[in-house]
Amino acid sequence: MSDPTIIHWEDNDLSEFGSLPLQYRHNLHQHPLFSQAALARLIENLDREDYYVNTMDVTAHNVTSRREGEIRGLSGQEVFEAVQNGHIWILLLQPHKSEPGYSEILRQIYEEISGKLPGFKPKYQNMTILISSPKVQVYYHCDIPGQTLWQVRGNKSVYVYPNREPFLNQACLERIALGEAHEISLPYEASFDAHAVVYDLQPGRMLHWPLNSPHRIVNGDCVNISFTTEHFTGPIRRMFLVNHANGILRNRLGCSSLSQKTAGFGFWAKAALTSAYRLTGIQKRRRKTLRVDFQVDPKALRGVRSIPAYEFRR
């Protein structure tokens, strides 16, 4: 990679970063750490708590079809074979644990963004890598941190929806912020699509959308490799505190018509409520319990072999 910079900022007006969905060009699809060989090695070094692997209906928006699985006893190349011929979505959570070079990429990304956007000071940054089969879907959901999706291989359609009612159900967002609901629990109706901005994401393109914007993804008829970066800034952290506190007020005390203002006395009262809720131990650290019922198998139909179900806590 001869170009020392990652992002080609000339593609869009930076003043709209964070307020509108924006695409930019990048060169990380050429980086050796995102080659299939490097990712195969990464898969072989995974600890169990460092990935999710799912299968789902690829023909419809069927949230109930989503299943959790495991990768065991396979080479990285065998996993890629299963992905190529199957219906599999893999999320690698901490790639830097076995390859510190990913931390350096993440550092450079946010250094570039901070250098271009005065006042952008992230307190937290993270990277996850996605490897998924042809036509696989990521169902309608929203995320709590700021999010950017970077395409490395293959193409996908990304539907981005307005971050307001009815597309973003406030009560559901609050439950997600509380850790009491999964991101894909966000209500979706096909009629929402008329209000979505749809992007054809190709290798060497990245897409950033406004905070909490609901989105869904449909892979093209090809293997897809991409990664996400997520961050918290001061304003994002304040919005999280408000949604978290509103969830307490709605679900514990029966309040409604709750403001999402992130300034003033009301905000500071909610920030104090969230802090007290955590410090007093009322909200215990929630561990996810996964029901695992399949094994990735390149020789099985759709790359998935059913196994006796068991629970895995992370």
Image: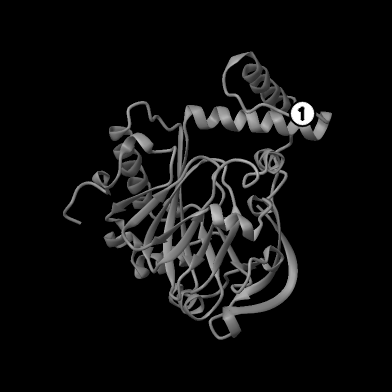
Q: 99 or 107: nearer the eye?
A: 107
* Number of numbered discs visible in the structure rendering: 1
Which corner quadrant of the image does residue 243 belong to? Answer: top right
- Is 138 placed above or below 147 here? below
Is residue 242 rendered to the left or right of residue 254?
left
Q: 296 or 177: nearer the eye?
A: 177
Furthest-top residue in view?
265
- Is 167 placed above or below 177 here? below
Q: Where is residue 279 in the image (x, y as percent from the top left)?
A: 70, 25
Q: Mark 1: which secondary structure?
A: helix
Q: What residue type is labelled 1?
A: Leu
Dot 1: few (<14), some (14–19), or many (≥20) neighbours within 10 Å?
some
Q: 28 or 93: nearer the eye?
A: 28
Please identify the quadrant where the N terminus is shown.
bottom left
Is residue 32 rendered to the left or right of residue 305?
left
- Is 17 placed above or below 302 here? above
Q: Residue sitting at 51 percent across and 73 percent down?
A: 135
How is the rendered protein coloured?
Answer: one colour
Is residue 16 rendered to the left or right of residue 192?
left
Q: Residue sitting at 58 percent across and 48 percent down?
A: 142
Q: Residue sitting at 51 percent across and 66 percent down?
A: 218
Mark 1 = which residue? 249
Which corner quadrant of the image does residue 178 belong to? Answer: top right
Q: Where is residue 308 in the image (x, y as percent from the top left)?
A: 75, 74
Which corner quadrant of the image does residue 68 belong to? Answer: bottom right
Q: Position of residue 271 (x, y in %)?
A: 64, 22
Q: Residue sitting at 67 percent across and 22 percent down?
A: 270
Q: Where is residue 241 in the image (x, y as percent from the top left)?
A: 62, 29
